[in-house]
Image (tube, rainbow, N blue to C red):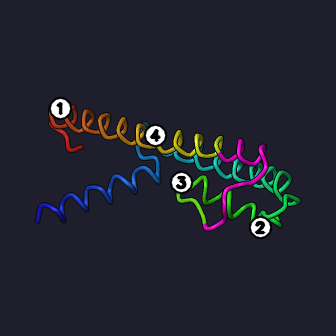
Protein backbone atom coordinates (compact mmCIF):
# COMPACT_ATOMS: atom_id res chain seq x y z
CA UNK A 1 0.00 0.00 0.00
CA UNK A 2 2.78 2.45 0.90
CA UNK A 3 4.60 1.86 -2.40
CA UNK A 4 1.44 2.64 -4.36
CA UNK A 5 0.95 5.87 -2.40
CA UNK A 6 4.53 6.94 -3.04
CA UNK A 7 4.16 6.11 -6.75
CA UNK A 8 0.96 8.17 -7.00
CA UNK A 9 2.59 11.10 -5.18
CA UNK A 10 5.61 10.91 -7.49
CA UNK A 11 3.31 10.85 -10.52
CA UNK A 12 1.50 13.96 -9.23
CA UNK A 13 4.81 15.77 -8.75
CA UNK A 14 6.00 14.84 -12.26
CA UNK A 15 2.75 16.13 -13.77
CA UNK A 16 3.06 19.28 -11.67
CA UNK A 17 6.60 19.84 -12.99
CA UNK A 18 5.44 19.33 -16.58
CA UNK A 19 2.61 21.82 -16.10
CA UNK A 20 4.67 24.19 -13.88
CA UNK A 21 1.92 24.23 -11.23
CA UNK A 22 3.94 26.23 -8.70
CA UNK A 23 7.05 28.40 -8.96
CA UNK A 24 9.06 25.49 -7.53
CA UNK A 25 7.77 23.14 -10.22
CA UNK A 26 8.38 25.78 -12.87
CA UNK A 27 11.96 26.28 -11.71
CA UNK A 28 12.75 22.56 -12.02
CA UNK A 29 11.05 22.33 -15.42
CA UNK A 30 13.00 25.34 -16.69
CA UNK A 31 16.29 23.85 -15.51
CA UNK A 32 15.55 20.52 -17.17
CA UNK A 33 14.51 22.19 -20.43
CA UNK A 34 17.61 24.42 -20.41
CA UNK A 35 19.89 21.43 -19.83
CA UNK A 36 18.17 19.43 -22.58
CA UNK A 37 18.32 22.26 -25.13
CA UNK A 38 21.95 23.05 -24.32
CA UNK A 39 22.84 19.38 -24.63
CA UNK A 40 21.15 19.02 -28.02
CA UNK A 41 23.00 22.09 -29.27
CA UNK A 42 26.31 20.89 -27.89
CA UNK A 43 25.68 17.44 -29.38
CA UNK A 44 25.20 18.92 -32.87
CA UNK A 45 28.25 21.20 -32.61
CA UNK A 46 30.41 18.39 -31.24
CA UNK A 47 29.22 16.04 -33.98
CA UNK A 48 30.26 18.57 -36.62
CA UNK A 49 33.63 19.06 -34.92
CA UNK A 50 34.10 15.33 -34.45
CA UNK A 51 33.39 14.73 -38.11
CA UNK A 52 35.82 17.48 -39.15
CA UNK A 53 38.54 16.19 -36.85
CA UNK A 54 38.16 12.48 -37.60
CA UNK A 55 36.68 11.77 -41.03
CA UNK A 56 40.01 11.75 -42.87
CA UNK A 57 42.05 10.06 -40.14
CA UNK A 58 43.35 6.64 -41.11
CA UNK A 59 41.62 3.85 -39.18
CA UNK A 60 38.73 5.94 -37.85
CA UNK A 61 35.14 4.75 -37.98
CA UNK A 62 33.77 8.28 -38.00
CA UNK A 63 33.33 8.68 -41.77
CA UNK A 64 29.98 10.52 -41.90
CA UNK A 65 28.11 13.16 -39.94
CA UNK A 66 25.68 10.42 -38.89
CA UNK A 67 28.42 8.30 -37.33
CA UNK A 68 29.85 11.42 -35.67
CA UNK A 69 26.41 12.29 -34.28
CA UNK A 70 25.99 8.73 -32.99
CA UNK A 71 29.41 8.89 -31.32
CA UNK A 72 28.83 12.30 -29.70
CA UNK A 73 25.32 11.37 -28.56
CA UNK A 74 26.52 8.22 -26.84
CA UNK A 75 29.40 10.10 -25.23
CA UNK A 76 27.07 12.82 -23.93
CA UNK A 77 24.69 10.19 -22.61
CA UNK A 78 27.70 8.76 -20.74
CA UNK A 79 27.06 5.32 -22.19
CA UNK A 80 29.87 5.37 -24.78
CA UNK A 81 29.53 3.45 -28.03
CA UNK A 82 31.01 0.58 -29.95
CA UNK A 83 33.01 3.11 -31.98
CA UNK A 84 36.65 3.26 -30.92
CA UNK A 85 37.98 6.39 -29.27
CA UNK A 86 38.96 9.23 -31.60
CA UNK A 87 42.38 8.94 -33.17
CA UNK A 88 43.24 12.60 -33.78
CA UNK A 89 44.49 14.86 -30.99
CA UNK A 90 41.66 17.40 -31.50
CA UNK A 91 39.16 14.51 -31.50
CA UNK A 92 40.55 13.22 -28.22
CA UNK A 93 40.39 16.68 -26.64
CA UNK A 94 36.78 16.98 -27.84
CA UNK A 95 36.02 13.57 -26.34
CA UNK A 96 37.36 14.56 -22.92
CA UNK A 97 35.49 17.88 -23.04
CA UNK A 98 32.22 16.09 -23.90
CA UNK A 99 32.70 13.61 -21.07
CA UNK A 100 33.36 16.47 -18.63
CA UNK A 101 30.21 18.22 -19.87
CA UNK A 102 28.17 15.03 -19.48
CA UNK A 103 29.34 14.54 -15.89
CA UNK A 104 28.53 18.18 -15.15
CA UNK A 105 25.01 17.81 -16.57
CA UNK A 106 24.34 14.68 -14.51
CA UNK A 107 25.59 16.40 -11.35
CA UNK A 108 23.56 19.54 -12.11
CA UNK A 109 20.43 17.51 -12.76
CA UNK A 110 20.90 15.52 -9.54
CA UNK A 111 21.44 18.72 -7.55
CA UNK A 112 18.39 20.37 -9.14
CA UNK A 113 16.18 17.41 -8.29
CA UNK A 114 17.57 17.28 -4.75
CA UNK A 115 16.95 21.00 -4.24
CA UNK A 116 13.45 20.59 -5.68
CA UNK A 117 12.65 17.75 -3.27
CA UNK A 118 13.86 19.74 -0.28
CA UNK A 119 11.91 22.83 -1.33
CA UNK A 120 8.73 20.81 -1.99
CA UNK A 121 9.09 19.09 1.39
CA UNK A 122 9.29 22.48 3.08
CA UNK A 123 6.29 23.73 1.10
CA UNK A 124 4.23 20.69 2.13
CA UNK A 125 5.24 21.14 5.78
CA UNK A 126 4.26 24.82 5.64
CA UNK A 127 0.91 23.95 4.03
CA UNK A 128 0.22 21.32 6.72
CA UNK A 129 1.14 23.81 9.46
CA UNK A 130 -1.24 26.35 7.90
CA UNK A 131 -3.97 23.71 7.84
CA UNK A 132 -3.93 23.13 4.08
CA UNK A 133 -3.11 20.14 1.91
CA UNK A 134 0.17 20.36 0.07
Q: Position of residue 84 (x, y in %)?
A: 66, 62
The answer to whether the residues at label 3 and label 4 have Cβ atoms under 8 Å apart is no
Please give left or right for residue 28 compared with residue 125 in the image: right
Mark 2 secondary-structure assignment? helix
Mark 4 secondary-structure assignment? helix
Circle 4 sits on which residue? 107
Q: Tell me the quarter of the image containing the N terminus.
A: bottom left
N-term mark: 1 or 2:
2
Q: Tell me the quarter of the image containing the C terminus.
A: top left
Circle 3 sits on which residue? 78
Among all residues in the image, which is located at the extreme right? 56
Marks 4 and 2, how far apart in space? 28 Å
The answer to whether the residues at label 3 and label 2 have Cβ atoms under 8 Å apart is no
Please give left or right for residue 45 compared with residue 26 in the image: right
Between 27 and 47, the one lying in front of the other is: 47
* Mark in the foreground, 3 or 4: 3
The disc at residue 49 is none
Between 25 and 56, the one lying in front of the other is: 56
First to last magenta residue range: 82-95
Marks 3 and 2, how far apart in space? 18 Å
N-term mark: 3 or 1:
3
Marks 1 and 2, how far apart in space? 56 Å
Marks 3 and 4, how far apart in space? 12 Å
Q: Position of residue 129 (x, y in %)?
A: 15, 32
Circle 4 packing at 10 Å, graded few (<14), some (14-19), many (20+), is few
Residue at (17%, 32%) from the top-left corner? Answer: 130
Circle 1 sits on which residue? 130
Q: Position of residue 44 (x, y in %)?
A: 75, 53
Please give left or right for residue 81 compared with residue 51 in the image: left
Amino acid sequence: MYVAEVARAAGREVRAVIHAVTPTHSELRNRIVALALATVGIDLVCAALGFLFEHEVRGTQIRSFGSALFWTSTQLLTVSSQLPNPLSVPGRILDVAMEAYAITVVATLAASIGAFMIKRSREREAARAAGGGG
